[in-house]
Amino acid sequence: MDDFRCMIPVAKSPKDYQAFRISPGDTNKLALVFDTAAADVSLTFCVEIFDIGGKTPPNRHLSAVEMFFILQGEGRATCDGKTVSIKAGDSLLVPATATHIIENTGSTRLYALCIMVPNEDFAELIRSGTPVELDEEDLAVLRRHAPALC
């Protein structure tokens, strides 16, 4: 008989997400969807929400790759000195060790799915921040349904 592990799936909805600002003056907040505490795997999956004009500080990860998928809004991503415009539907893969910045250049909030593998203590960094609430605008974006096909 093969040795395998059966995991019970974990299901969450936006009301279950915990959101944090890593530092008090940050212009972005992160809503944790899944992390090592919930999924028992070394990853962090969150929604990063940037205020108008908001951005991340320059940062890098020693062994983790980070992927962003833009849900709504527009901005700019800089990775090791190369800058690209980003908007809803775009994706960005940041390799390990690359110094990167994501910034909101639009007139509305910027929403991005963010996945980091392995976790590299990212979830712990997020949870060490200040808890914040997701407001109605945030929840509306997170609950969005695809338009009905006619």
Image (cartoon, grey):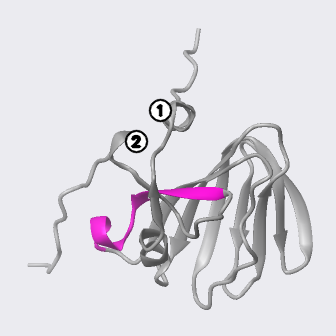
Amino acid beneath label 1: Arg
How crowded is the residue under tag 2: few (<14 C-alpha within 10 Å), some, or many (20+)?
some
- Identify the residue position indicated by label 1 in the image: 143
Q: Would residue 33 be counted in the magenta stretch? A: yes
Give the answer, above or below, for where 143 lies relative to 92: above
Between 19 and 113, which is closer to the camera in this rendering?
Answer: 19
Q: Which mark is residue 14?
A: 2
Q: Would residue 59 be counted in the magenta stretch? A: no
Q: Residue at x 83, y 42 (%)?
A: 106
Q: Position of residue 40 (x, y in %)?
A: 28, 73
Check the image and name the residue furthest to the top.
150
Amino acid beneath label 2: Pro
Bounds of the magenta segment: 28-40
Residue 62, by quadrant, is: bottom right
Q: Residue at x 47, y 62 (%)?
A: 45
Q: Position of residue 42 (x, y in %)?
A: 40, 78
